[in-house]
Image: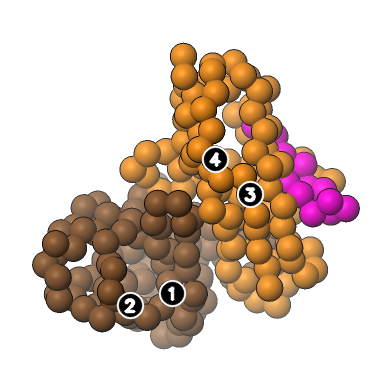
Amino acid sequence: GNSVTQMEGPVTLSEEAFLTINCTYTATGYPSLFWYVQYPGEGLQLLLKATKADDKGSNKGFEATYRKETTSFHLEKGSVQVSDSAVYFCALRRGQGGSEKLVFGKGMKLTVNP
Amino acid sequence: DGGITQSPKYLFRKEGQNVTLSCEQNLNHDAMYWYRQDPGQGLRLIYYSQIVNDFQKGDIAEGYSVSREKKESFPLTVTSAQKNPTAFYLCASSIVGGSTEAFFGQGTRLTVV
């Protein structure tokens, strides 16, 4: 079946540090890939997405590239801020054959200190 | 503004009581989902629905029930059969099929005492 494996943390960084959160997936066909962010006490917000191989999603300084050859979708940011403190989830969804539900990784809690 | 509304944000219930969590969306989405979130376990799918009057069990459906009488609404009932109901519950919706993302509500934190 479809699955997502991501770094679980927790991770603590200093402001302006470089961030990488690894995410790999297992899926048949060609899934769409997503990164969601969850701030304390809130629901999930879409951070970025990519729908086909070699696509790069980007938003708010975060980037991730859909790598089919390594089945990966690693999230990166060059310089994190305190406001980036949150839980980050990698997810996939196969669009073929009707409504395929989202499959999530376990999430990674990031704390950024000033 | 279009979006998903979950209510209430916090809910307290006594052990053995059924409780219903509300989820309403005005995004005109056909698919709706309920997830449960526990610390360190990510999101686990409880139920999902692709069309009115139809729904399917997810990975952890035992002790829960849902209905989908209207496109906009997908309420979740946590029954007394759910052994450990204290958790954060998230509702989401999406277009059926395709490669689109799901949109989430703000969540309901249920505490059973």
Residue B3 visible somewhere in the drawing:
no
- Mark 3 and mark 4: span between their CA atoms? 9 Å
Tell me the kind of residue under disc 3: Gln
Gap in angstroms between the C-alphas marked 3 and 1:
21 Å
In this picture, which residue range is highlighted in magenta?
A62-73
Q: CA distance from mark 1 to mark 2?
A: 8 Å
For label 1, the SS is loop
A96 shown above or below A80 = below
Chain B color in figure: brown
Residue B94, percent from left and from top = 53, 63
> What's the residue at 18%, 63% (across, down)?
B112
Point out the frontmost of discs 4 and 2.
4
Q: To which chain does the residue with label 4 belong?
A: A
| Circle 4 residue | A9
Q: Which residue is mark 2?
A: B64
Reading the image, the residue beneath label 3 is A6
Q: Secondary structure under badge 4?
A: loop
- Residue A49 x/y as whole percent: 67, 47
Chain in orange, by letter, is A
* Spatial CA span between label 2 and label 3: 28 Å
